[in-house]
Image (cartoon, rainbow, N blue to C red):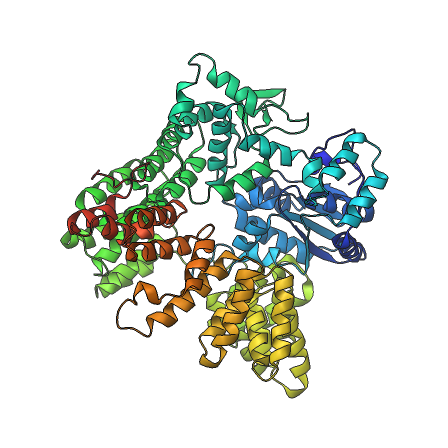
Amino acid sequence: MAAWAPHELGVHQSVGDGLPPYIEREHDRDLRRALKIIRAGTSAAVLVNGDSCTGKTRAAYEAAHAELTDWTLLFPRSAASLLRAAAEQSIGPRTIIWLDDVHNSLFAEKEGEAVAAALLTLKDSLRHLAIIITIWPADYENLTREVRGARDTLARRRALLRSECRFSVPAEFTPAQLDAFSRQATDAQWAQAADSAREGGDLPQTLAAVVELLHRYHHPSDEAGRAMVTAAVDLRRFGVREAIPVRLLTDAAPGYLSARSLKNLSPQHWARSATEWAQYAHLNVCAALPVELHPDGLGADPDRCGLNDYLEQHISQERAFSAPPATFWQAVLVSDLTGSSLTRIATSAFSRARFKIARDLYIEALKRQYTPAFEDLCVLYSETGMIHMRRGIDELLALVDVIDDDGASAFHLGADVSYVATGQVTAEYQEQSFALAESLFKRAVAVGHDLAASALKGLYEDFAMHDKAAALAREIPQPDSSQSVHPAILLHQAADGDAHALDELTKIAHSGEPRWNALVGPAFDVRSLITRWPSRLEALGKRDLARRLLDSGVAAKIPAAVTMLLDFLNRPEEQDEAQAVLRAAAETVRNFLYQRFMSMWPQQGREAMALLSRARRLGRHADVLHVASALHKIPRGRRAAEDITRVLATRDEYARAQYTLALWLYEAVEASFEGLPPVESIPGEVTELLCAAALHHQDARRLWGQLQGRNGRAEEARAALIAAVDSGDYTVVTHGELGSHLFPNQPDRATQMMMFGLTAQGEPHAPW
């Protein structure tokens, strides 16, 4: 740790000479206490949560430098490097794994879930391991949200981020803290920064010069340079994490400019002057588009740049309801971005109903040998209905013929066509759909796709072709019995009473080997939940074994493990322990906050409300709203639910709460009428809440558009619905809402729009 300089770990450069004095705040004391506990012999993930340039990385650095300065520090720059280190078992005790801005680095990669799984295994198998993570609050909320349905792609990241060691860094310094900094400031620029921060408390942001950098963006001396920065922000908010091609930004910039600004551009020099403005190091500290290191590691790369993260966060919020201009999409299509980045941008175009643009980008990604783009293209065609058209399926079949991905594309397309074959959806090629699905699955089987044979067998069974299904089942390779059985399979066998499996599972439990850690995740998946292994192991006299596995699942922050443990603690003498488990889980997990609240409501109403107040003070607005929404479904709880939500909506200005409360109040009025209520009957509070929420919430913007339409304000309604689409809600188009509004008397054009979407400018796209 001592060998690393602060800036090497992500601490922002500051005005003045050297590293500014550090003022300890409340979260610093708690953070250092957590690291002391790790040093004493435990392992844990330590999460530092805060907006850009609030001091979260500096807080983590100061705490680690104070408590773990003699430990080894590993700062993986990619998912592959961390997974390789974990696989090679090169990470030992007394190690810090440093994950700065994890939302923009390892967790943003496609291997993000594998990274989290590896970190959880390391945490459970090593002592003296500190996994230090910094993250933005909005990204923390996105990555820890509950995912409904079978495909939970965030489970391991959510488990790691829901650490019991979680600390929030406030964006503002108090007057007393500013006074303390001023007393220690030995540089005139530091003292000036403290004085400048007196009004807003934004000392870290002022020291990092980003407050003035944002002001410079909003009041530019070079409009084209500002346009380049805006285009870079759009790339980042659409998921591009690689270094940004400067040529892409200059190609995209004209579309962000007004007609007047375009006329003022110098044809020969504007691109160079715009780039110089955007890459100028403001106060010699930070640039909007900082230069990137050349790939060979020597000097700057004149063709690539980054983006200041403070600008990224703030301008992204400003542009949440804006789609890029046509020049952006055109520049992306001809750029030298990787196929992975093109696919992410294509998905953003898809979510904004730019279906033709998305299609072109997916195909370009395939040309660059990024084969996962095909599955996303299938999703696009399924959602728009293009896959059910003869020309749509023909296009996809032609692509499968040239894609070399070990049968993955044939398998995915076969799965989509099988929905047509089994009658779940209709298509122009309905009569040929079975033969088509069969041939695609067979093609995938022929090249060894691991799921294709089972899918083909299922297709035969759906059509009562049992002989073919049985013959295929005999051909499916069986696991090699000579190899060791995966612990998850062993668990199911043991729960079924297999004595050998039970004995082997007991040995694994006492060995402390990685095989035990490999069991923890699968022990709480859907299949394992169905087996009800805790009660079955208990019936076999292995209650201690079941309890140990449950405790391991709880320690790994797996919500299903907590649920199963609460069911397991069914003895009268265990009820106090069960309540303690529930209290601990309610501190971090939404569903258990609800469960604990409901266990107290309404008999212990005051205590229940205090529980939610504490969660709200900790910034768990989404969790509190989840509880309020559930409470609102109970007739006697509606008033309390509305009071809770009104606090979130008015005091905290939480957009989702503003929308939810407006919706409840609107539905209460609607229930009093047959059909839509008269506009004049809608309370003014509904309008006020929706107007506020529409600035940040796409569903609010959508409902706002509906109400504007009913008020006869066609242009305002159209603008609101388009804004909802531009924020990423393509269903406004595919469900026909926007088409019905634009073409109330032309049902064919409204239907056409559901399939072909919008142009870059937000107009209905012609058939393509």
Q: Is residue 497 left or right of residue 323?
A: right
Q: Residue furthest bottom?
A: 572
Picture quarter with the N terminus: top right
Task: Find residue 543 and report its image quarter.
Answer: bottom right
Foreground pick, 184 / 135: 184
Q: Is residue 72 left or right of residue 383?
A: right
Q: Is residue 661 left or right of residue 210?
A: left
Rendered view: 82 above or below 7:
below
Rendered view: 402 above or below 547:
above
Task: Find residue 8 and report its image quarter.
Answer: top right
Rendered view: 295 above or below 489:
above
Q: Position of residue 715 (x, y in %)?
A: 30, 46
Q: Residue furthest front?
A: 680
Task: Find residue 313 and report its image quarter.
Answer: top right
Is residue 509 in view from this perspective? yes
Is residue 549 in view from this perspective? no
Q: Position of residue 552 (x, y in %)?
A: 64, 66
Q: Position of residue 434 (x, y in %)?
A: 20, 55
Question: Which residue occupies 77% across, 31% down?
Answer: 189
Rendered view: 676 above or below 111:
below
Question: Which residue occupies 56% across, 57% down?
Answer: 158
Q: Is residue 320 left or right of residue 756?
A: right
